[in-house]
Image (cartoon, rainbow, N blue to C red):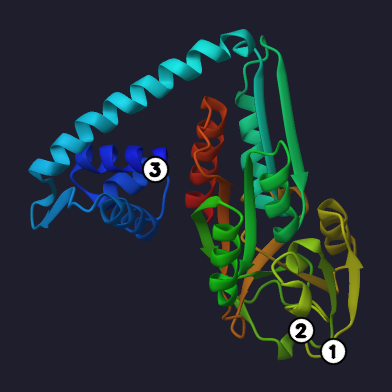
Amino acid sequence: MNLLYLKYALEVAKTHSINKAAENLFMAQPNLSRAIKELEASLGIAIFERSPRGMLVTPKGELFLQQAQKLLRQCDALETMFQNEGAERQTFSLALPRSGYLADAFAEFVRSVDRSRPLEILYKETGPLDTVELVTRTDYRLGIVRYDARYDRYFKDLLADKGLDSVVIAEFSYRLLFSRRHPLADRETVSLRDLSPYIEIAHAEAEAAILPDTAKKGEHAGPNERRILVYDRAAVCELLDRSPDTFAWSPPLPDTLLARYQLVQRSCTDQLRRYKDVLIYRKNYRMTELDHRFITLLCDTKRALL
């Protein structure tokens, strides 16, 4: 039995709402609904009764939740018993795509960490398939994978096969990045045709959203396909600032980063594809206080941008 599902059920019982429970658990509502249905199916009982007044606990559900709460308390006590030796060391690990808003959330997280205690943080920017392998096989506990929403079924099957849980944390379309001195910078929206005279700066952040068998010329290449390939986020920003006839594709970026490099973001009328950033972790992994803190800061950053 998945212990996380027990926590999910207790949170739903406490809030009487799937939506509120999902918000408290930093989950997407459909993912939480699916987890509750899977738990009920595995038990062969209805834990909740759906009604206009919200999620009401059934009599059998009440008995189950009482035992679930006892079990979780026992698990907490057992874990505490054997973790006291290393309780002073703060550890955190994350694999993720190159992305301005994720880096911004991580920087804010590092700023909040207690400096008086020993600390070990692992942070690796990489593509989605490498992230899955790092979380599955190494000491990386959390990962964020980014992919084109068209590949949703592929990644859901992959994560299930690897024994990983997932939560969608953001969904967005890529935007255009320009220098403030770019000829198109004053437009509210831009078309692909408008980009034809200019040079695209392409980097790993865009390529990370593509599956290996589709990563040929780039997901967002403009009509002229004139490109400079760069694999460092700061280098992209420097080039955009110093070469005002260039542009790049990017997820939404924080205003602080745009101001630092004198950049602007604009929507593209021809960019209709949606991308997902999905938090992944091993099934039954018990998140630490640092994990929860990072996720909270990440959600705050996402809300401000998206």
Question: Does residue 112 appear left or right of residue 131 in this picture?
Answer: left
Asked if labels 2 and 1 touch by Cβ distance under 8 angstroms, the answer is yes
Q: Is residue 253 visible?
A: no
**Percent coordinates x, y for residue 280 in the rendering:** 57, 49
Q: Earlier in the sequence, mark 3 or mark 1?
A: 3
Report the front residue among 272 and 238.
272
Q: Secondary structure at mark 2?
A: helix
Disc marking residue 1: 3
Closest to the camera, between mark 1 and mark 2, is 1
Closest to the camera, between mark 3 and mark 1, is 3
Residue found 72% across the figure and 72% down from its top: 211
Asked if labels 1 and 3 touch by Cβ distance under 8 angstroms, the answer is no
Closest to the camera, between mark 3 and mark 2, is 3
Counting other residues with Cα less than 10 Å from the Cα at mark 3, is it few (<14), some (14-19), or many (20 or more)?
Answer: few
**Percent coordinates x, y for residue 135 in the rendering:** 67, 45
Residue type at mark 1: give it.
Asn
Report the front residue among 214 and 222.
214
Disc marking residue 224: 1
**Percent coordinates x, y for residue 130 in the rendering:** 75, 55
